[in-house]
Amino acid sequence: MLQRKEKKMGYTDQLIRQYEDEGTRTTFRQYFDEMGIQVSNWDGLFTQMTDDGEPAIVRLDEEGQVIGFIQFGRLIMTSWFFEDRLGFIREFWVHPGYRNRGHGAQLLEKAEAWFKKQGICRMILTTDTAEKFYLRYGYQRDERIMAKNRAPVYVKTME
């Protein structure tokens, strides 16, 4: 389901919450293939992603081909006494033909703006492929936090 379209110079950004569109599904398949991740039940994965309610911003070129996407959502960290709301960058990908043209930075900025509107000022993510990119945009590696996938964890706090 399309919630909002924003047309810019040569591309369109779509905020989505449902992963039913075949173009979006094809893009996620390409992303997971590039990452070397095997998925045995694609329909189940897309249903789970829709059920989780995590939005994504998908950027399309003038012909409707996907330039990239960023999937994100709220993450609640709790203990017996405290609760902390974080913004979680779940998946993030830019098509190889569009990399190093500012699309990744713009998609990340849009996700961060979404978090700010939700009153969330701290973001968290894991990466083992784009450390320099995230460091450039203010994320810092936090070795005190352990990810279940054992990938390095990066955190950014906004004012």
Image (cartoon, helix red, strand yellow):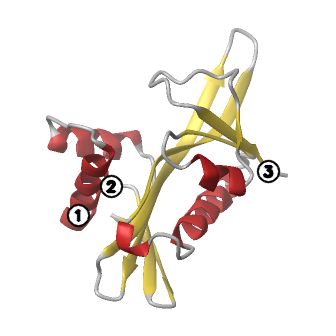
- Position above or below: 41 against 22: above
**Cβ–Cβ below 8 Å for labels 1 and 2?**
yes
Outermost residue toward the top in this view: 80
Quadrant location of residue 62? bottom left
Q: Mark 3 = which residue?
A: 158
Residue corresponding to mark 2:
18
Q: Is residue 101 visible?
A: yes
Instruction: Please tell me whether residue 64 is drawn above or below residue 58 in the rendered image.
Output: below
- Residue denoted by label 1: 21
State the separation of the CA atoms marked 1 and 2: 8 Å
As drawn, is 24 to the left or to the right of 53? left
Q: Residue furthest right?
A: 159
Using a 10 Å C-alpha cutoff, classify the residue at mark 2 as few (fewer than 14 neighbours), some (14 to 19) or many (20 or more). many
Q: Residue 106: x, y in percent? A: 59, 70
The percent coordinates of residue 80 (x first, y second) are 70, 8
Q: At 53% across and 24% down in the image, what residue appears?
A: 147
In front of the other: 64 or 38: 38
